[in-house]
Image: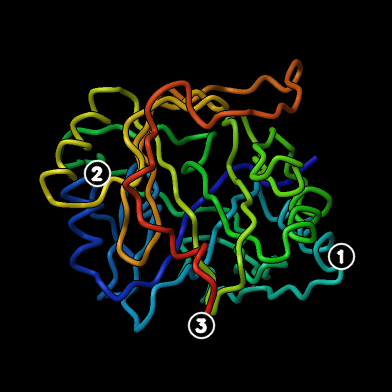
Amino acid sequence: MTELRGLGYLRIQTQDMPRWRELLIDGLGMAVGSGPEPDALYARVDERRARLAVLPGDSDKALAVGWEVRDEFALQRVRETVEKSGRAVEVLSRKDATYLDAEGALAFEDPAGTRLEVFYGPVLDHSPVVTPFAGRWVTGGLGLGHVVLPATNFDETYEFYTQVLGFLPRGSIRLDAEGVNRVRFLGINERHHALALCPAPPTEEPGLVHLMTEVDTLDAVGQALDRVNRMDFSISSTLGRHTNDKMISFYVRAPGGWDLEFGTEGMLVDERHYTSEEITADAYWGHDQTGSEPLKAFIPAG
C-alpha cells in the first residue's frame, strides 16, 4: 500500500517565461499564485498557493515532481522504504521545506533521473481563487492531476514506482505488436492514473511527456481550446475522449517541447472492483495527433 496520496505539484525550468505565462494564465485560465522566487511564475488552481512553478533558466527541464503524503510519520516511512531500496534520500532542511511551501519534505531521484520531492503539510492560501475565466479545477483528494514521464531504463523505473513507492498498476497500451514496449498507467488514489511511464531514449536533462489538469465542465475545456488556438499555440492532440480514464481533453504544446493535457469528466476508480486492463486504442473518438511535432522526450540526445 502506498503512502503517497496524490500529485502535489510540478516545478519546471524554461527559456521562455512570457510564453508560459500566456499559456497558463491567458490560455488555460489558471490564477497567478505566489512563491519565493521573484522571477518565477506560480500558477494557482485551488487553496494551495501554487500547484505549478515555472522558473527561468538556460534550458527546458523538469526540476521536480512533488508527491504528497499524509503526515510526518508517512514521510518517515517513505524515507525508510526508499533508503532500503538502495537509493540515496535527501532530508530537506526546514528552510528548504519552507521554500516548497511544506512543513517537511525529502527528495531523491527515480531510476530515470527525475527528481522526486515527497512532502507533507502544504501551506494553504485561504483567499478565494480568482481565475481569469472562472474555471474550477478538480483537485482535492485526487491531487493536481497526472504526469507522464519518459523512462530511459523502463523496467527498473517501473519496478521502483510499483515495488518501492507502491503505485498501483492501472493498465497499459502496447507500443509494438509483441507488447514488449508499453506505456504503463499507475494510480495512488481514485484518479485513474497519477503517473504514466513511457519508454524513451536517453536525454541530457530530465523532461516530461505531459502534465494533465482537470476542470469541472466541458464548456471550460472548449473555451480554453478556443483561447489557445487564437493565441497560436500548437494543438498536439485534438479534442477527444480517452479509453482508459474516460477524460475528454485536448493537448497543447508548451514551450520546451512538452504537452499540457486539459480535460474534464475523468473516471474515478473503485479499487474494490478494479482490474488492470490493456487498452488497444488511445481514444474512443478525437485525439488526432497527426499534425503534432515530436515531443522533446522522444528525441535522442545529441
SS type, badge 1: loop
As measured in the structure, the alpha-carbon distance from the residue carrying label 1 to the one carrying label 3 is 32 Å
- In the rendered image, the vertical position of residue 123 relative to residue 219, given as above or below: below
Mark nearer the viewer, 3 or 2:
3
User: Which residue does the image show at 62% across and 52% down from the upper left?
Assistant: 198
As measured in the structure, the alpha-carbon distance from the residue carrying label 3 to the one carrying label 2 is 33 Å
Q: Name the residue furthest right.
A: 84
Image coords of residue 114 (percent x, y)? 60, 67
Which label number is shown at residue 204?
none
In the image, taking residue 60 as reference, residue 85 lies left or right, namely right
Q: Toward the viewer: 160 or 71?
A: 160
User: Which residue does the image show at 32% across and 31% down from the upper left?
Assistant: 239
**Quarter of the image where the N terminus is located:** top right
Mark nearer the viewer, 1 or 3:
3
Which label number is shown at residue 85?
1
In the image, taking residue 185 as reference, residue 232 lies left or right, namely left
In the image, taking residue 70 as reference, residue 156 lies left or right, namely right
Image coords of residue 111 (percent x, y)? 72, 67
Residue type (three-letter) at the residue carrying disc 3: Gly
User: Which residue does the image show at 73% across and 20% down from the upper left?
Assistant: 274
Residue type (three-letter) at the residue carrying disc 2: Leu
Residue type (three-letter) at the residue carrying disc 1: Ser
Around disc 1, counting alpha carbons within 10 Å, would you say few (fewer than 14), some (14 to 19), or many (20 or more)? few
Please report whichever mark, 3 or 2, sits nearer to the chain's N-terminal start.
2
The image quarter containing residue 193 is top right
Number of numbered discs? 3
Residue of label 3: 302
Residue of label 2: 28
SS type, badge 3: loop
- In the rendered image, the vertical position of residue 265 relative to residue 146, given as above or below: above
